[in-house]
Amino acid sequence: MSDNPEHSTAHNYFLLQLAEQGIPGFVLFCILVATALLTAERLYHASAHRPDVRRIVLAVSLSLVIIIFHLFLNELVEVDKIGSIFYVALAMLVRSNTWLEDERFAGEQESFKNI
């Protein structure tokens, strides 16, 4: 939060990143957001055969979209109420990816056993 008497700040987290971190910080945060959204889309399509994982990926993706939309209106990703959900959602995307990779790896081992 700001140190000024009103404790006011930019009402857009992307502008706040640009003002506080400069262009490198802004670009890195945009890359993080874009990578998360593209990964969510890739995992959603890759989990067509696993409805349980697909539901998790869909819920996490929608959570990320809502948080990112909210970042255009406020800067609360640094507050524990929203920021923790943002990073937990990113962690859930990583975990969903490992669930799908473990399944593919197990399938490859089964195909080698049949040779």
Image: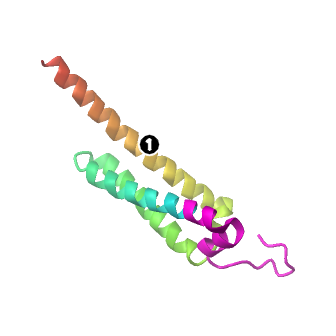
Answer with left or right where residue 89 lies relative to residue 25. left
Answer with left or right where residue 4 lies relative to residue 69. right
Q: How many C-alpha atoms fall within 10 Å of the one at disc 1: few (<14), some, or many (≥20)?
A: some
Residue 55 position (above or below residue 17): above
In the picture, the quarter occupied by the N terminus is bottom right
Residue 77 located within the stretch drawn in magenta? no
Nearest the viewer among 115 and 91 is 115
Which colouring convention does the figure follow? Answer: rainbow
Q: Residue furthest left?
A: 115
Residue at left 36%, top 39%? 99
Q: Horizontal and vertical percent for residue 53?
A: 34, 47
Quadrant in which residue 111 is drawn: top left
**Which segment did they paint magenta?**
1-28
Residue 15 located within the stretch drawn in magenta? yes
Q: Horizontal and vertical percent for residue 12?
A: 61, 77
Residue position for label 1: 95
Answer with left or right where residue 20 lies relative to residue 69. right
Residue 28 position (above or below residue 9): above
